[in-house]
Amino acid sequence: MSNSKKLAQAGILIAVGVVCSTFSIPIGAAKVFPVQHFINVLAGVTLGPFYGVSMAFVTSLLRVMIGTGSLLAFPGSMCGAFLCGTLYKHTEKTSLAFLGEIVGTGIIGALLAYPVASIVMGREAALFGFIVPFGISSVAGAGISLVFITALKKTGLQIIGGIK
């Protein structure tokens, strides 16, 4: 696929991520915001890790600029997109892309959010305090993307990047 097609698809995913960033699903006492995780897996599977991380960065930047996101979106989304895209690139298994998003965002990104919250944002935070909320949100969004990608595979429909 040409770089211009990848850039166009990344732009569409960025737009979806920004526009739908306030969409939430109530799960118990928590609100889950699954859209970023959904598009991270789509980008990782169809565009690869470089475009996935770039898309996650721009989406986070735009959300912070318009006030619908915080600085905590950067480490979570970028780690998730990178690990998801890298695992899919090397294995072509959607299930590993799903797990990459969960581990990348839910664990690695959550741990990296601690210094961002405590040092950069000046908030009190616990080292492992972001793992549960990031993990729940990433499982929900990655799960939705897994269902979506599986449906695309079964129907034979192709999106720009192609799903193997």
Image: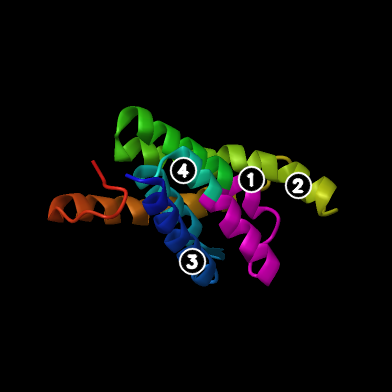
Q: Earlier in the sequence, mark 3 or mark 2?
A: 3
Which residue is labeled 4 in the image? 101
Q: CA distance from mark 1 to mark 3?
A: 19 Å
First in residue order: circle 1 vs circle 2 = 1
Verify CB contact (< 8 Å) between mark 4 and mark 3.
no
The correct choice, above or below, for 118 with respect to 91 in the image is below
- Residue 111 found in image quarter: top right
Judging from the image, the colouring scheme is: rainbow
Q: Residues within 10 Å of mark 2 (few under 14, many from 20)?
A: some
Read off the residue under disc 3.
15
Q: Nearer the viewer, residue 27 or 147?
A: 147
Q: Which mark is residue 116?
A: 2
Q: Are marks 1 and 2 in contact (CB under 8 Å)?
A: yes
Query: Whole-Å distance between the Cαs marked 2 and 4?
Result: 20 Å
**Dot 4 amino acid type:** Glu
Q: Residue at x 64, y 45 (%)?
A: 75
User: Disc 1 residue type?
Assistant: Pro
**Crowd class of label 3 (few under 14; some 14 to 19; many from 20; radius 10 Å):** some
Write down the region rendered in magenta: 55-77
Residue bearing mark 1: 75
Disc 4 element: helix
Label 2 or label 4, whichever comes before in sequence order: 4
Q: Position of residue 31 (x, y in %)?
A: 54, 65
- Alpha carbon distance from label 1 to label 2: 8 Å
- Is residue 65 part of the magenta span, yes or no? yes
